[in-house]
Amino acid sequence: SQKIEQNSEALNIQEGKTATLTCNYTNYSPAYLQWYRQDPGRGPVFLLLIRENEKEKRKERLKVTFDTTLKQSLFHITASQPADSATYLCAQNSNSGYALNFGKGTSLLVTP
Amino acid sequence: DTAVSQTPKYLVTQMGNDKSIKCEQNLGHDTMYWYKQDSKKFLKIMFSYNNKELIINETVPNRFSPKSPDKAHLNLHINSLELGDSAVYFCASSQDTASETQYFGPGTRLLVL
């Protein structure tokens, strides 16, 4: 069955540094990967989507890469700020195509 | 204006009771979803509806029955609640089944005692 893993449960970094979060998938080649942000007590919010034929996507301080050989996506936040502290979820399209399979998320803490 | 809204926000109830959670989206989307997020924060798809028709049912116990009276609403009714049903339930919507991006509601925190 499809499996999507975010190996780091938590990541602590200092303000101004680049945060790098990892998402790995197995048993399935997704057409795309998405990254969502979830704050405590709230629903996930869409950030970026990258397709299998794209190597990199950027949006302001965010960058996502997709390596189909390594079966991995990396999510970068440059010049991180305390306001970036949240849980970041990686998601792939399910093999039915109609829903998302989410990883468990990585909790990012940016300290001043 | 809230794009995807859910009621109630919190629900505390006894084992064996029946309860409903409501979801409404004002985005004009055709497809709606219910996800369950357990205590380990793992978000898992339960159901999906497209234009009021059920298209996904992910091996959820039949105590859970979704209902879509129109494409802007997707409700979740749960019979004979069990302790293991305690979780946060998220409603989401997307433009249609081909759309990748989903918009989530704020969640309903269900606690079964």
Image (spheres, grey):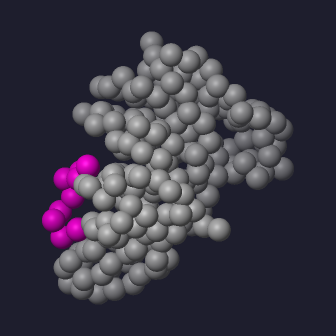
Q: How many marks?
A: 0
Quick check: A3 left or right of A77? left
Q: Is residue B64 magenta?
A: yes
Q: Is residue B35 at least partly visible in the picture?
A: no
- Residue B42 lies, in percent from the top left, at 41, 52
User: Which residue is rendered at x = 29% and y = 87% of the image?
Assistant: B14
Quick check: A26 left or right of B54? right
Q: Is residue A74 at least partly visible in the picture?
A: yes
Residue B85 sits above or below residue A65 on the image = below
Q: Which residues are magenta?
A: B55-65
User: Which residue is rendered at x = 28% and y = 74% of the image?
Assistant: B77
User: Which residue is rendered at x = 28% and y = 37% of the image?
Assistant: A96
Quick check: B81 left or right of A76? left
- Residue A48 lies, in percent from the top left, at 60, 36
Taking depth in this image into account, of A28 and B113 the one nearest to the observer is A28
Residue B104 sits above or below residue A24 on the image = below
- Residue B4 lies, in percent from the top left, at 52, 63
